[in-house]
Amino acid sequence: MGWENYLDSGGNAFSHDYVVPETTFEQLARELQSKLKVRSMRLVGDPQLRVTRVGNGGHYISQCMGVLPKVDVLIVFESREWEAAEYVRDAVTAGEKKALIQLPHEGGEEAGMDECARWLRSFVSEVPVEFIPSGDPFWMPA
C-alpha cells in the first residue's frame, strides 16, 4: 500500500497499525481495491466514516479483538467471516465508529510473494525465480 511512513508501531515490533491521512472508509476501500487489484472485498461500516487509524487483524477473532479498539478500520485477509465481520458489526451496532475491510486471500499475500521472489533472486542463481500472480478468483456482478 505504500504506507511504510505511516506505520505506528507503538513500541511493538510486530505491530501493523497505521496512521494515514484522513479519508473516508469508502475512499480507503477503493484505494485498497485499486492498489491490491482485488474485486471481491467485503465491507462492514459506514462508508462516510472518517478514518485516520488502520490496523491489520488476523485470520481468527482473537487476532482481531486486540486491534479493533485502537483503530478506525480493521483490515483482514481471508478471515472467518462469522467471526471478524460479526465482531465489527456488533461494535458498529453498539455505536462505535469502526469498520472492516475483509479481503480475499490473494489480496493479502500476493504482494508479499512478489517481494519474496525478488528476495530469492538476490541469492538463488541456480534456478530461475519468477513471481506468478494468481489474482482474485472471485468476481462481482455489474
Image (tube, rainbow, N blue to C red):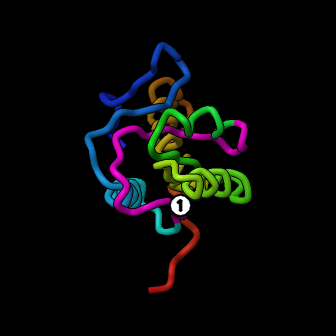
Amino acid found under the numbered disc labelled 1 = Val
Q: Is residue 137 on the magenta stretch?
A: no
Residue that appears at 50% across and 23% down: 123
Instruction: Say which residue label 1 marks.
Output: 44
Residue 120 picture location, percent across and down = 52, 31
Residue that appears at 32% across and 55% down: 24
Quarter location, residue 122 = top left
Image mark count? 1
Quarter location, residue 36 = bottom left
Residue 16 picture location, percent across and down = 49, 31
Mark 1 closeness class: few <14, some 14–19, many ≥20 residues within 10 Å? some
Question: 83 or 139: which is nearer to us?
Answer: 83
Residue that appears at 45% across and 21% down: 9
Boundaries of the magenta span: 41-62
Q: Is residue 142 above or below residue 54?
A: below
Question: 96 or 34: which is nearer to us?
Answer: 96
Relative to 107, is 20 on the left or the right? left
Q: Is residue 8 above or below residue 68?
A: above
Which residue of the protein is positioned furthest toward the front in this rendering?
A: 95
Quadrant (top left, top right, bottom left, bottom right) of the C terminus: bottom left
Residue 137 picture location, percent across and down = 58, 68
Q: Is residue 44 on the magenta stretch?
A: yes
SS state under label 1 = strand
Residue that appears at 31% across and 58% down: 27
Which residue of the protein is positioned furthest toward the top in this rendering?
A: 11
Q: Is residue 116 above or below residue 40?
A: above
Q: Can residue 131 be seen here?
A: no
Quadrant (top left, top right, bottom left, bottom right) of the N terminus: top left
